[in-house]
Amino acid sequence: MPDQLNLELRQLRDATASLATGHLTALRQRSELSQRQLRQEVVNASTEAGIYGLTGVQDGSPVANSLALAVVRDTLAGHNVIDLPGIFAPSPGLLAGVGEPLASSHLGPLLAGNKQGAFGFTEPGDATQPTRATRTTGGDLVINGQKSYVTGGADADFINTLVEVDGIGPAMVVVDTSLPGVEIARRFESIDGSHHAAVTYSDVRVPQSHIVGEAGKGMKRAIEQVGGVRMAIAAASVGLARYSVGFVDEYLQNQNSKARPVSEHRRYLYGRLRISVYGARSTLYRTARVADSGDNAVNEIMAAKVIATETVGEVVDSAIQIVGGQALVVGHPLESIYRRVRSLRVAEGVSDVLAVNMARGRLDLGVGRL
């Protein structure tokens, strides 16, 4: 539970809160800053607070575990600053632990901020077969196929692409967007303001050394990466839900008076919000502890992601209902959050699909603890 943190985690939480209130909240208001200037100011403040490097890797291991990152993200989102650029250093993601030549050609530049990666996993709904690769006599891969939603693909220098390699199985392959045959078929902006792309591969020749990890186990590596992102989404969702409830709390306190007390209906809605956030936050912290224990936490992470994203959507919607029309004005905190969180129920696994996956695991495979 959030109230059962050890001294080190409480200090981390407090340092994160100080970063949010002492620097990030003010930086959000500085409209005169360009995006580049804003990012650099955030990087400087986050580095000084000891937060910036927590998403990195040291001596092959993550700097911070799941619980520490949940604490930080929950705290930042609880102050509605989680979306500011530059709070965290680039993380290795799917490239964690790669050897040469990828360590020098892609991982190093990624961590230094000189290259931007993307994640190509989702196939078009009407795709007749997955993105495939054949092997040449020299061992190179020739890739054909398409990815309909490449996360961060609009501005990427390379795409970590899940490919079905003939005779081997699924593999994660680093594909540079500058290679012949790689085409950005469509760039688009999501409702939350993030930029992505649809990509096609036509006889794209990639060296075998660009396979990440063990060929044939690409799906496992992809799922492990998705698990970390799902935890990040869950933590941000919980924090944003807490921020929204706090906003409603202050609003109702200001509205309440003996002459005109808050209506019973609004009290009911407010009470339900607090109950929902309590459940989602408890789930998040328990899941982080399960993940850090070394146990298989796939089901717990899926459940946490679904519960947290569904909760924040319902909380913000009800918060707007309580506050009224002013919360719909562009620029209002609740209006901004409402747009941002809608995409979270789809990102890294649609809620309905994750529920089906959990049911399939239990009913068809006899696995899973939930």
Image (cartoon, helix red, strand yellow):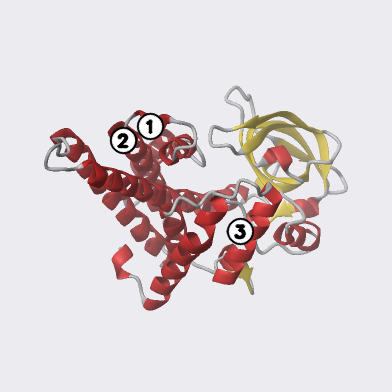
Amino acid type of the residue that numbered disc 2 sits on in the rendered structure: Val
Label 2 belongs to which residue? 323
Residue at the image position 79 percent from the left and 51 percent from the top: 208
Question: Residue 368 in the image: x percent, y percent?
Answer: 36, 50
Question: Residue 217 in the image: x percent, y percent?
Answer: 61, 51
Label 3 belongs to which residue? 42
Examine the rendering and report whether any part of residue 90 can be seen: no
Depth check: give the residue in front, 126 or 329: 329
Question: Residue 337 in the image: x percent, y percent?
Answer: 45, 40
Residue at the image position 64 percent from the left and 49 percent from the top: 216
Report how far apart the C-alphas of labels 3 and 2 lie in the structure: 31 Å
Question: Residue 50 in the image: x percent, y percent?
Answer: 56, 71
Relative horizontal placement of residue 301, taking residue 114 as reference (left or right): left
Q: Which mark is residue 3?
A: none
In the picture, which quadrant includes the N terminus?
Answer: bottom left
Q: Between tags 3 and 2, which lies in front?
A: 2
Label 1 belongs to which residue? 326
Labels 3 and 2 touching (C-beta < 8 A): no
Amino acid type of the residue that numbered disc 3 sits on in the rendered structure: Val
Q: Between tags 3 and 1, which lies in front?
A: 1
Report how far apart the C-alphas of labels 3 and 1 lie in the structure: 30 Å
Mark 3 Cα-neighbour bin, 10 Å: few <14, some 14–19, many ≥20: many
Please tell me whether mark 3 sits on a helix, a strand or a loop: helix
Residue at the image position 55 percent from the left and 50 percent from the top: 28
